[in-house]
Amino acid sequence: MTEYVYLYRGYELPASPEEMQKKTAKWMTWLKDLSDKGHVKSLGEPLQPAGKVVKGTKKQVIDGPYAEAKDVVGGYSIIVARDIEQAVTLSLGCPIFEDGGSVEVRAIAQMELGDGN
Amino acid sequence: MEIEEHFFRHEFGRIVAALTRLFGVGNIALAEDVTQDAFCRAMETWKLRGLPKNPSAWLMTIAKNRAVDILRRERTARVSEPELKRFLESEWTLVPTVEEAFSANAVKDSQLRMMFSCCDPNLSEEAQIALILHILCGFSVKEIAQAFVCSHAAIEKRITRAKKILAGSTKLFDLTDADLPSRLSSVLQALYLLFNEGYHGSSPEAAVRADLCREAMLLMNLLIEQPALVTPRSYALAALMYLNAARLLTRLDGSGNLVSFFEQDRSLWDHKLIAEGQALLNLSASGTELTKYHIEAAIAATHTSAATCEDTDWQQIVSLYDMLMAIHPSPVIALNRAIAIAQLNGPERGLHEIGVIHDLDRLSSYPFYPATLGELEFRRGNNLAAKAHFSTALSLARNPMERNFLQRRIDICEES
């Protein structure tokens, strides 16, 4: 089994409390199902949309990330799957797609020890 | 753990009311923004982490903290109520005052005052109802447009205008104000219309209709909990809502089709609601005031106390409709009175009564006017005339449920 990160990117927030509630319940159901099947290593955390970006040799601090709304990472979870195909399949039930968002599926890189040669 | 049904919607109304009290009614938009913000954070967190132990307290804490920040930063600009302003200006009292505004009783009080503010006499009844749904019940413009079968743009305009008028007042309506009795009348009328829109309304979506009835009842409950606001007419309106709500679900069959009153499955009526409605009706019987709410509740109680349609005391119902016509004449009430007379004295007498309704032309676009003619003609064996009336009604139907219902009546006329 391999660990994968789901990066949740950009989506429209629902307009009314009732819709928010429905959406929240959908996410909870989806993650609970994945979790019950043993695919969730960590539910992860939501991220605030705004923050700072520190970059360059001068360690310049700027407000950011200033990406397009659809590209802003809104949170992440860590998933356990057989391979990337299964990790992708498991993401298909994510409610984010109904709202124009995306899930980026990335394997957590395993650092191999060198054999000394 | 699951989120309680409509939890977000109801918390929204409570938090907006509490914040408006703190920021001043002129800053209602700010109160809505802060609330919206708290909800976004709740959603983002809860969808991944699950629900906290006390979701309501969690949301309130976010809102309270934000309120303290804002009040601290813009100490004088935000507040308009003098009795609070003093306490919000000093760091000694700022936090306790905000805490106090979010206590259970203060929140209820703010909701009530907001309800009375929404029923400003400068606003039309439609605008008052839209505002109540939007601010106190957390309905989006889209949800209100759906409930009233109105365009999004029309509702948006109505709410924007209404909010401007609301924000123009110096503070939320004061429940000790001398205008209280007349404002209470407007509030009851608005809740009555809100409930009726759900009960008889033209919206095609059954779920939306039940929602409107439920919201009207929750606000009504808030009102009759408050000793200063409990009048016999408040109890009468509450009784009317309970007795009708008990029958709400039997108005539709399993496939969502309208069921004629005479064919409703009475075993499915909600007997707990009926008992509560009856108790409220008894409470309404003090004093000398007799309102349309009293009479309509009494009519509903006559229906709910009959085990079968045949057992109904139609004589009593006709007398009640006579009283209703005397204090509140309208062609729709006259039509319902004629239906009761037909039950009592046969379809010919019913048709005669319909024929002499004053202002009959005001019913020309009301589908249940020709539908009633059709029903009575059908009962006296005049299927051809019945079918013609049902066809007229079909052409006036306002939603698929009404269309299906009338089409089935036409089919029955053709079969027999």
Image (cartoon, rainbow, N blue to C red):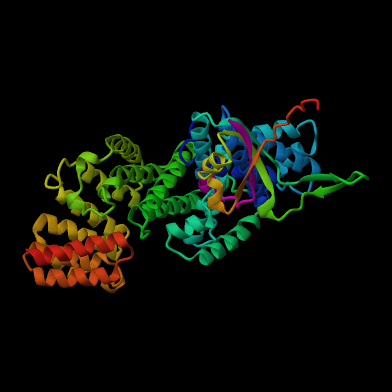
* Residue A9 in the figure: left or right of residue B158: right
Q: Position of residue B403 (x, y in %)?
A: 27, 64
The magenta stretch is A1-21
Q: How many marks?
A: 0
Residue A5 in the magenta stretch? The answer is yes
The residue sitting at 48% across, 57% down in the picture is B144
Q: Report the front residue among A86 and B30.
A: A86
The residue sitting at 74% across, 48% down in the picture is B78
Quarter where residue B342 is shown: bottom left
Q: Position of residue B284 (x, y in %)?
A: 35, 41
The residue sitting at 17% across, 50% down in the picture is B263
Q: Is residue A30 above or below residue B324?
A: above
Q: Is residue A28 above or below residue B293?
A: above
* Residue B195 in the figure: left or right of residue A15: left
Residue B297 in the magenta stretch? The answer is no
Tell me, yes or no, if residue B26 can be seen here: no
Q: Report the front residue among B19 and B51.
A: B51
Q: Position of residue B261 (x, y in %)?
A: 21, 52
Considering every residue shown, the one lying at the far right of the view is A58
Quarter in which the C terminus of chain B is drawn: bottom left
Q: Is residue B415 above or below residue B212?
A: below
Quarter where residue B245 is shown: top left
Considering every residue shown, the one lying at the far top of the view is A116
Considering every residue shown, the one lying at the far front of the view is A117
Q: Report the front residue among B176 and B389.
A: B389
Tell me, yes or no, if residue B166 can be seen here: yes
Q: Report the front residue among B280 and B307.
A: B307
* Residue A65 in the figure: left or right of residue B358: right
Q: Position of residue B200 (x, y in %)?
A: 33, 56
